Image (cartoon, helix red, strand yellow):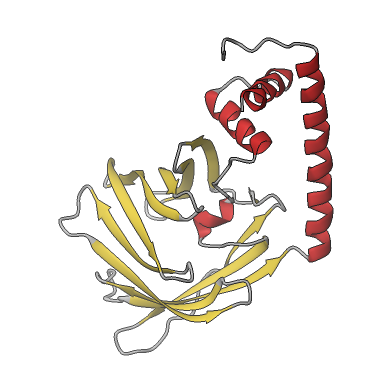
Amino acid sequence: MKTKIIVSIIIAFTYGMKSTAQLLLLHRIITGEDTITYHDARIFDLKGSVKSCVCSSSWINQDGSIEPSLKNDTINFSINGQCLHNENLSFIEKVYGENNLIIRTKNQEVDMSSGETNIRVSNYQYDNKGMLIKEFGEEPFCGSVQTFEYNYYYNDKGLLVKETIRTQTANDIEVVSYKILEVDKWGNWTKRRVYNSSPNIFGQTGKIQMRKISYYSDEELKQHFERRKKRLNEIRRGAKEGVKNQAPTFGLG
C-alpha cells in the first residue's frame, strides 16, 4: 500500500498534478481502488457507451391530445463519456469524496421574454455506484436568485422513476413521476410518460418524452481500451523507475 501511494505521488509530480482532487483520482486509477464509475452522460439519465442522444418532448393537454414537439435536443459524448457540443452547459469542477462524487456545472440560457442570459449553477451528487442521487444549486428567479434541490429515485433496474423538487420560493415539494414505456437493449429508456404533481401555466401536468440513442461500436471501444491500457502501462513503468531511483516519500512513513 505504501509503495502504491509513493507511485501515485511520483506520477502526480511528474505530470504536474498538484491538487488534492487530482492526486486522489490518480491514486484510485493506479491502485484500482476507484469505486465510482462516472460519465457526463449520467447527468442526462444515460448509461453505457453513448455516442449521441436526440431527445424530444410533447406535452399532453387536459383533453388528452398531444402537443407536437417544437424542438429536438441533441447531445454528443466522447468515447470517454465526456459531454461534447453542448453550448449552454459548461463543467466547472469535479470533486471526489469517499462515497460520492460531486460535479459542478454552469448552464446558460437566454430568457425569451427579457433577452437576458440566465446562469444556473448546479452540483450533481453521485453515490458509490455512479448513480445520480441529488442535484442542488442556484438559479435566477424574478430578478433575484433562489436555491433548488432535486432528489432522484430509481427502480431495481436502475431506471429513474421519481424525482422530488424543492425550491427556496415554493411552499410545497413538487413530485415528478416517470412511467417507462420503452427501453433499448442497453437499459436506457427510449420512451416514457411524465407525470407532474403541479400543472404548468397551460394546465398541462404530463408529457411524452422520446429518445433516439446511438452507441460506440465494439470495435471503437476495443481500440479505445487498448490505447488506454498502453498508456497506463507506460505510466506504471515510469513510476516503478522513479521508485527504484529512491524518489522522496514526502513524509508518508
Residue at image point 65% right, 36% down: 31
The furthest residue to the left = 171
In this rendering, position of residue 77 left or right of residue 129: right
Q: Which of 22 and 104 lies nearest the eye of the viewer?
A: 22
Q: Tally the numbered discs.
A: 0
Residue at image point 17% right, 59% down: 172
Instruction: Residue 173: give x, y in percent of width and height.
Output: 21, 60
Q: Quadrant of the N terminus?
A: top right
Instruction: Residue 41: give x, y in percent of width and height.
Output: 57, 56
Q: Which of 116 and 211 lies nearest the eye of the viewer?
A: 211
Residue 137 image-quadrant placement: top left
Q: Which of 175 and 97 lies nearest the eye of the viewer?
A: 97
Q: Is residue 252 above or below residue 225?
A: above
Look at the image and tell me whether residue 117 can be seen: no
Residue at image point 59% right, 29% down: 22
Residue 250 image-quadrant placement: top right
Instruction: Residue 191: give x, y in percent of width and height.
Output: 51, 78
Residue 208 image-quadrant placement: bottom left
Look at the image and tell me whether residue 59 can be seen: yes
Q: Is residue 131 above or below residue 230?
A: below
Q: Quadrant of the C terminus?
A: top right
Q: Which of 90 and 228 lies nearest the eye of the viewer?
A: 228
